[in-house]
Amino acid sequence: MTKMMAKTKTPGKALPAGIGKVLKRLHYPLEVIVLCVRWYVAYSLSLRNLEEMMAERGIEVDHSSVHRWVIKLVPLFEKAFRRHKRPVGKSWRMDETYVKVKGQWKYLYRAVDRQGNTVDFLLRAHRDKAAARRYLEKAIDRNSEPDTITVDKSGANLAALEALNTERSTPIKVRQNKYLNNIVEQDHRAIKRIIKPMMGSVCSHHPGGHRTQ
């Protein structure tokens, strides 16, 4: 197949201003950039995998270019998508798991609603009451307040919820039930299946973790 050197393409007017400005400085078609970023985030693909996949489609793009696109665009896409995020349910399942971020182990705090929709996420260096409370404050601030939050047997998560409830006129109902929390634990396992082939190296802009190699 004859190789095609991609040229700059003006982003569509529908794109948010911040994303449009960044894309104008990147010397590849919008479709190529968005596809590479999407595949990198969604699947267990390395940067070099994407370089080879683009080459098979006649597009010459270096893996380092894809890396720059991910670093520049993922935070902007997340910010834009958050504005259009559907409301989550009133019953949350909260849990945390261990992931490697740029070579260091971190705790990924996440919650999903009863239907499995992600409420929010937060990466912290420690698994303690302060980390759990910071996550809860962030999640509640960005979403409608839940009626119920289910946690496992983590004392730190329970302590954070109890402390939060002392400051609320209408306390959040707290349940400790490992069985009901299976939905978020299974979701964490799916995230780790994506991260593991990339040796657990991720960046911190996404609940699933963005890999950096």
Image: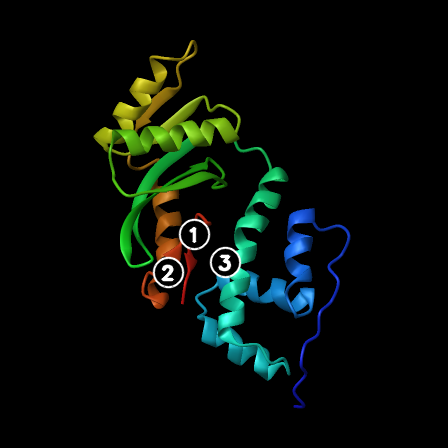
Q: Residue at 48% x, 64% y: name it.
A: 43
Q: Position of residue 160 (x, y in %)?
A: 30, 25
| SS assignment at label 3 | helix
The quadrant in which the N terminus is found is bottom right
Eyeballing the image, is 61 above or below 97?
A: below
**Quick one: label 1, few (<14), some, or many (20+) residues within 10 Å?**
many
Relative to residue 115, is residue 161 drawn left or right? left
Quarter where residue 195 is shown: bottom left
Q: CA distance from mark 1 to mark 3?
A: 15 Å
Q: Is residue 92 visible?
A: yes
Which mark is first along the chain, 2 or 3? Answer: 3
Q: Position of residue 64 (x, y in %)?
A: 49, 71
Which mark is first along the chain, 3 or 1? Answer: 3
**Residue 76: mark in rendering:** none
Name the residue tied to disc 1: 208
Q: Return the residue nearer the eye: 89 or 130.
A: 130
Q: Residue at 28% x, 34% y: name it.
A: 152
**Residue 71: mark in rendering:** 3
**Residue 195: mark in rendering:** 2
Relative to residue 96, is residue 208 drawn left or right? right
Colour scheme shown: rainbow
Q: Position of residue 66 (x, y in %)?
A: 53, 68
For the residue marked with disc 1, what is the amino acid? Gly
Which mark is first along the chain, 2 or 1? Answer: 2
Q: CA distance from mark 3 to mark 2?
A: 17 Å
Q: Is residue 90 visible?
A: no
| SS assignment at label 2 | helix
The quadrant in which the C terminus is found is bottom left
